[in-house]
Image: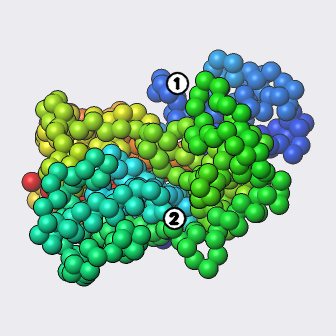
Amino acid sequence: MASAPSPHLFAIMLARVHAVCRALADEGTLPAGLDLSRVVVEPTKDASHGDMASNAAMVLAKQARLKPKDLAEAIAAKLRDDDLVASVDVAGPGFINLTLKTAVWAEALRAVLRDGDAYGRLATGVGEKVNVEYVSANPTGPMHVGHCRGAVFGDALCSLLATAGFDVCREYYINDAGAQVDVLARSAFLRYREALGQDIGPIPEGLYPGDYLVPVGQALAAQYGDLLLLQPESEWLPGVRDTSIAMMMEMIRGDLAALNIQHDVFFSERSLISGDVDKVADTIEFLRAKGDVYEGRLPPPKGVPVEDYEDREQTLFRATAYGDDVDRPLKKSDGGYTYFASDIANHKNKFDRGFRNMVDVWGSDHGGYIKRVQAAIKAVTAGQGTLDVKIVQLVKLLRNGEQVKMSKRSGDFVTLREVVDEVGPDAVRFMMLFRKNDAVLDFDLAKVREQSKDNPVFYVQYGHARGHSIFRNAREMLADLPEETEARVAYLKDAPVERLDDAAELGLARQLALYPRMIESAALAHEPHRIAFYLYDLASAFHALWTRGRDMPHLRFIITNDAELTKARLALVQSVVSVLASGLAVLGVTAPDEMR
């Protein structure tokens, strides 16, 4: 297999558009020193408008002091001489639509076969480190189905960024310094008493009621006997808290492993303040030295409540200087740090570790928190650091359209493990990505097990399995067709794919040529759902072509009296199978050779 991919078709055409613009600059039509960074070549929204479109004239017209349409005509005139271009049209105010020669699509298939596993892998992010913080569920219990969506989104985003060439760090921020872990400790202490034989009665309001804390109580009883019963809370709470957090994190790691999710770093919030250096205090003083922290009073909130508002002199971050609506408190009235103060120190720590690019995946209830954290990152990184926050909306868990009732194990929610155990990790991962992250997702446990087009994960995996079924059938005619993927790709790479001339075959080749650009655009936008949508469309086109062959024998993949045409069509099938496997791997979903 090739170790590095060929330049993809859209990158090739963008380079040619750039070359035309530079040629026009040499001729004096455009000014020297052009900024071409905003010029793009992308698929047309309507296939009747051609294969690709460029905005070159629209974004360069101001620099050139020309009307966009006049500049578009000048660019189009030169592109008509390009050896890959069949025709060029100028549309609307100055968009340039390109139709490519049919031979281009045969070469696009050869590129898929030639690149093998490397097809779709890009160098877009080479040299760029990205830190993606995701899941970061409070260590107070098992993960629930809401955490599941953020976990899958974050993990798929990391794979997508890595495929595009970025150096990715997968990070989990353990919220182990807030009041919730003290509540966890008190809840575990109750189960400790229960493990010692005491009647604890109903779980008091405000404590965690789930049965998942029973093993924690038993572990504490085995470790301490009845010793803790003789101690005041101030003495037993720290040890119980540490044991409880450790056992909850072990449970959470197990939940994540059930979805094949692993993190590179588990970073403790408590470590920011509990080590030799109080990093939160250091961060506050760092900002104070820059004039970004001061002692003052907040005005009463107008209309929208301001968190942590107290009418007192307090330590404030000058967030309004960096685009936020109000300045933000860094210390509480008891002298402890606000959660925001720890968050600033956390992100400064990431920047100090070499991560200029940061992505946080947050739940739907954190939308109002984005602006202040982005303001803080501007302050602590002198504008060099960037944070993109991806909000993951709620999941509605259904069975045959009816809402699923809560779990006894957890007390008040359905656990991630229960869902994975019922439908499997592939269905969970694909369906969590088959809707944009900022839209509410309906997840129907019955529908994701259907074997139909209405079940997207089945339909895409079936496309991969169908391709392998075609290979098995083809061996009756081509006895030397290898079973192993790498050998089969090598066998088919010289197939006469120029013989593929049916509109549906060429349409499938166009979709395959789009894959590397889809990886690039989805990675830069931090939107892995685009890959799930693309795979469904690709599988649908492949299934449709298979169905046409059933109805029209001359379009079948296996033509018994024409071995060379059969090889060409098998090369198309192999290209589809390779891209489906690659895209499913990005999403963390398996690509089965058979459906059982």
Q: Position of residue 594 (x, y in %)?
A: 14, 56
Amino acid type of the residue tagged 2 in the rendering: Glu
Question: Label 2: which residue?
Answer: 269
Q: Position of residue 175 (x, y in %)?
A: 46, 60
Query: Quick one: label 2, few (<14), some, or many (20+) residues within 10 Å?
Result: some
- Up the image or down, 214 lies above or below 505; here it is below
SS for dot 2:
loop
Q: Is residue 96 left or right of residue 63?
A: left
Observer-nearest of 15 and 388: 388
Observer-nearest of 226 and 317: 226
Does the image show residue 518?
A: no
Does the image show residue 264?
A: yes
* x 58%, y 48%: residue: 388
Residue at the extreme top: 92
Quadrant, the N terminus: bottom left
Quadrant, the C terminus: bottom left
Q: Position of residue 190 (x, y in %)?
A: 24, 63
* x 32%, y 48%: residue: 206
- Up the image or down, 559 lies above or below 191; here it is above
Amino acid type of the residue tagged 1 in the rendering: His
Query: Quick one: label 1, few (<14), some, or many (20+) residues within 10 Å?
Result: some
- Asked which quadrant contains residue 191, the reply is bottom left
Question: Label 1: which residue?
Answer: 49
How far apart are the two marked residues, 1 and 2, measured between alpha carbons? 54 Å
